Amino acid sequence: MGRPERWLLRRLALAIVLAPALAAVLAAASAAAAATPATPAAVFAWPAGARVAVSLSYDDALASQLDHALPALAARGLKASFYLTLASPVVAQRLAEWRQAAAQGHELGNHTLFHPCSRAAPGRDWVAPYRDLDRIDVAALRDEILLANTFLQAIDGRTERTFTAPCADRLAAGTPYMPQVAAAFVAAKARAGRGITADASAADPHDVETAAPSGVDGDTLVRLVEEAAAASGGRALVSITFHGIGGDYLDVSRAAHDALLDHLARHPQRYWVAPFVAIMRHVRASAAPAPSAAQSGR
Ligand SMILES: [Zn+2]
């Protein structure tokens, strides 16, 4: 047997010895590859293993929110989202306080400049005819919403935020407007309902449901978040949209609001209370596609 043959035999012997190990490695790699698509959902969890994420939000830039909601949140170390209607006189009159709220870690969210709503819907006589969403072109509304983001950036210096749809109306002159503005927001609350999203990791981030309670007691609010926690497989989100707190309109009493905040603050291992932008950034980061898909611009 000449040298080349011996060399070949040694290679063959080595290959025979290594083949099972190589096969095992390849099998493991292919199993890992097969498991990869499910990995983001499989490992999804709220920070610190909380059962449910809680988004407290306050729409319309109302004085009672500055007077009553902010101090109640501060006393318990809880952070929330304040969706400003930028044309509200309370924005101009108390600009420094809104700016301070952002500096304290709250989110200033976009609720448009002028709060246009459908005037045709029941009970909407209060909508001014020139702010009737049934007559506002979707491109004009898009411009208004994007300009509101610029105003908000001028107040808080931030470039990432979320949106709530005025009146939960989603059509501008009959055309769905969210697709026109979704890219400008991490997420949006665009529909009214019970406020519980069972699996936030699987939900459309620009179509999140929110509850809008008014005139309810503290037990009712506590029951809502308890129900979300009990039903949660560790991926649920509960969203509550307040208006007046102990004043203004669609109000919830200070006592009821305090009762909810006390309950949330007492159970930090159960509830992750955070600004909506932080909650949805977490969701979107956890659901991030593999690098190759990310490069394709999805
Ligand atoms: Zn509103």
Image (cartoon, grey):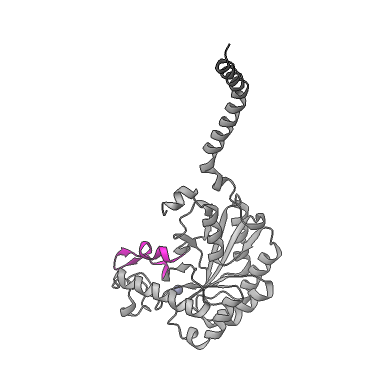
Q: Residue 86's spot in the image, x, y percent? A: 44, 80
**Which residue, as the protein is rendered here, is positioned at the far bottom?**
93
Magenta part of the chain: 167-185
Residue 135 image point, x, y percent: 28, 73
The vertical placement of 33 against 114, above or below, is above
Look at the image and tell me whether residue 118 can be seen: no
Classify 268 as above or below 125: above
Magenta span contains residue 161: no
Above or below: residue 284 compared with residue 29: below
Q: Kindly give the residue lying farthest to the right in the view shown.
A: 266
In terms of image quarters, where does ligand 1 lie?
Answer: bottom left
Q: Is residue 47 visible from the viewing direction of this image?
A: yes
Observer-nearest of 94 and 186: 186
Q: Residue at x 64, y 60 (%)?
A: 271
The picture quadrant where one finds residue 127 is: bottom left
Tell me if 143 is positioned left or right of 30 in this view.
Answer: left
Q: Quadrant of the N terminus?
A: top right
Q: Residue 224 at x, y = what percent? A: 59, 61
The quarter of the picture where residue 131 lies is bottom left
Residue 158 rendering spot, x and y as whole percentages: 51, 73
